[in-house]
Every structure is written in C-alpha cells, then in structure tokens.
Image: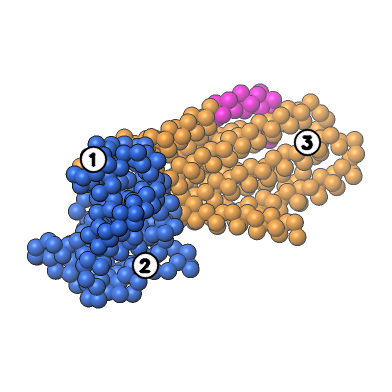
Chain colours: A orange, B blue
Amino acid sequence: MKTRSAYLEELQKINSRVNQMGSEAKLQIDKTIMAFDTISVPLCNEILKWDDHIDRMEEDIEQACINIVVREAPVASDWRRIASFMRMISDIERIADNCCDIAEYIKKLAGEDEAEVPEHLGDMFRTMRQMVNDTVDAFDTGDLDKANAVIDADETVDGYFIRIREEIEDEIRKSPAKVAQYLDYFMISKYIERMADHSTSVASWMTFIVKGDLKMYFTDRYHKAGEENA
Amino acid sequence: MSEQAKTKISVQDLHLYYGQFHALKGITMEIPEHEITALIGPSGCGKSTFLKTLNRMNDLEPNVRIEGSVRLDGADIYQDMDAIELRKRVGMVFQQPNPFPKSIFENVVYGPRINGIRNKAELEEICERSLRQAAIWDELKDRLGKSALGLSGGQQQRLCIARTLAVEPDVILMDEPTSALDPISTGKIEELAMQLKKDYTIVIVTHNMQQATRVSDRTAFFLLGDLVEYGDTQELFSNPKDERTERYITGRFG
C-alpha cells in the first residue's frame, strides 16, 4: 500500500509552484530586456504591475511550506527541499523586484536625452538571463551540472560589472552633460549584477537539496567575499 | 559521537536466530557512554530483539541461538558475566508501565531488597534518591505507602524508571517507553532521559521518529534484521546515506 500519498502530492505541488515562480521571473526578465532595448515605458509599466502577482506567489508558496512543515514534519531530502524552497523563493522574488528597479530606471531614461549605451550592458543582460534560465531548467530537471555552471557564470557577470563601470566612467568624461543617464545605466548594471547573485544563490540551494551539503554554499560565499575584501 | 566519547557497549557481528529465522544478521555497533542511542525501524526489523540482546532478555526465549559478541566495558556479556550481574548493570524499561501490585516504596526498593539490602534507612534513602532522579519525588513523596497501581500511566512509567535506577545500573534500555503515554507524559519521560544521560548510557527503541530526533544523539536504522545505517542523529535525519533509510524516515515505505 502506498503511504503518505497526500503529503507526497502536496510536496510535488509546492515543487511545481516554485518552478512556475521561476518561469514568471524569466518572463519578467525577457520583458525587462525588451523594454531596455526599445526604451518602452508601457512595457515597464506592465513589468511593475506584474510584480504584485509574483509577490503573492512567494507568499502562497511560503505559507504552503510552513503548513507542510507543521503538519508533516518532513525530514531528509524532503526537509532539505522545503528549507531550500523557502530560501529560493525569496531570491526569485528579489530577481523580480530587480526587474522593477530596472524598469523604473528605463522610464527615467525615456524622459532624458539619448545617451550612448555602455558597450557591454547588453551582453551583461543576456548572460544574466541565461543564468536565470539555466537555473530554472536545472531546478526543473534536477541537473546539478547545469546548476554548477550557473554558479561559475556569476564571475562572468561580475567581470562585466567592472568593465561597464569603466566604460561608464569614460562616457561621463566624454559627455559630462549626460551624467544623469550614465548613473541610470550604472544602477541598471548593479541590479543585473545582483540578479546574477540571486540566481547563483538559487543554484547553490540546488546542491543542498541534491547532496545535503550546506557548507559548500556558505564556504563558497564567504570565500568569495574574503577574496573581494583582500 | 564526539571524539572523546568512550564506547560503553561494543557489538561485533551479532547474529540471532529464532529457530530457523535469522532475526539479526551480523550487527556491528559501538554504543557510546553517556549518550542516547535510538533504534528505529519498521515492526519486525529486529530493533527490539537487538535491545534485548544487550541484557540477555532473549536467553529466556526457546530456540534462540546467538553468535557474535556483546561487550559491556570490554567484558563479553555472554561469556564473562552472569545474567544477574548483567541485569544489575543494564536495566530495562518497557512499553507498558509494569509496576508490581505493591506500594510505591516497595516497587522502588524491590531490586535493592532482593540484592540483600535490609536496612530500612538505607532503603528509604535509595527510594528518595531514585524517585528524585526519575523526577517524580515531589509528586509521590506523600504517598509512598499507596499502591503503585493507582498512579497515572505517565507516573507509573517514571516509577518504573525509578525502580530501574534503584539498582544503580550503568545502562538503561527503553523499549518504546512512551508509546502508551499522552504527549505531556511523553515530554516528561523524554526530558528525564536527557537528564539521565549525564550519569547513564541510554538505548531507546522508538516508533516515533520525532522522538528519536528530539532526544537521541545517535540513531540506528534496522531493516529485516540488518543494521542499515547508524550515525549522528542530526546527520541521519537531514542527510541519510542509505536510500532505504531515506525512504523509511520520509514515510515512503510500503
């Protein structure tokens, strides 16, 4: 006789909802890139409006996780999954928030004189999008190699951030009248860098789910932070 | 097990047969001193049988054959010790509280009395000390002469623990000690077990997985007579090494 079928069904349901939330975040990123490429204010408004929906998804999943913990006391990989979900959805929600932050800056740019887009900003956007896409795919299929590739890709995005900052410095020297626009671009690149971090965080939790190794995630992070401070 | 923890009971390649039935299949396990070790597994997995081998309760069963060794502080309990000496050192608490139909006092001092202690003052001292250790002195001190059968199930179980403590054992075996108790009495027994581990080594069989995670330092998972996995409780319940352990503790058996 099959045991705990309602529990397993609920666990599966929460899994699908996390997956769906990831897909929603992907869509928001697609729209953000499109809005950036076309400086489209209506698209920005659409992004801002849709954020409530993603916030509600986070709340619902969080509540479902709390309920299943209270009622079913999950252990082992079930528990690792639930604990990770609760962290992952907060990262996904932050990614969606960052889409809104960028949308606000795009709206600001739309009201300003046109300024040369920093050369690598588009590449940075697309690398980050690929990371988020791969993270959602890796989550869906349980592909740890893909999750690890996301963690590695974070350095590429960090590299873009440094490069773009230099490009922006050059542009400001060349056209001091457009400082405002370049500060907007700089903020956008910072948000993209944060989104890549959140994506990396989600990918790291995958390792915890599959392998149960929490240290890997934390030592990696502190290790990295230590290097930056050195 | 912390690195300093001393092994109290060392089990090497222990096999037990009930007639043709191979109930324990080569169990090897070191039980550390001053820790609580939980034995879990489905009914019929051998965990209670294993518990009973630790104080030779199976000696009384017909057709039982035991191979391998169980050492208590290095001494083989089947070769180098008689059963009476062993059971003084390894006490047992059962699933159903089983007080004798005697007064509370007589229940507690039953062991010391049959061990030859006659002095009233000494017996009274043992009674108070044991009941205090079992965290039930305050509840019972004014009714020591009353029948133990009038106590609640939870009180009876703590009385049985006091009776076990009265002979000053090293090890306390508990066979599902709370399965007949309500959550409050269960909480008291668990709290008691955690206090007692400072002075005793405790091995507990439980069907309640949450109980194992709450009280035990180490957990052993038995299945069909095999010791499938044995390790740190935290580790076993968060990241079991064996797929069968994972399936059992997450309820995917059956």
Left or right of B62 in this view: B1: right
- Asked if badges 2 and 1 are on one and the same chain, I answer yes
Considering depth in this image, is A167 or A100 the residue closer to the camera?
A100
Residue designated by label 1: B147
- Residue depicted at x 48% and y 68%: B4
- Chain for disc number 3: A
- Residue depicted at x 61% and y 37%: A94
Left or right of B205 in this view: A39: right
Report the magenta residues as a range: A35-55
Earlier in the chain: of badge 2 and badge 1, it is: 2
Residue designated by label 2: B8
Amino acid beneath label 3: Asp
Considering depth in this image, is B97 or A128 the residue closer to the camera?
B97
What element does badge 2 sit on? strand
What element does badge 1 sit on? loop
- In this orientation, does residue B220 appear? no
The residues bearing labels 3 and 2 have C-alpha atoms spaced at a distance of 68 Å
Asked whether the beta carbons under mark 3 and mark 1 sit within 8 Å of each other, the answer is: no
The residues bearing labels 3 and 1 have C-alpha atoms spaced at a distance of 84 Å
Q: Quadrant of the N terminus of chain B?
A: bottom left
Amino acid beneath label 2: Lys
B2 part of magenta stretch: no
- In this orientation, does residue A47 appear? yes
**A52 above or below A70?**
above
Whole-percent x, y for residue A15 in the image: 43, 39
- Chain for disc number 2: B
Residue designated by label 3: A184
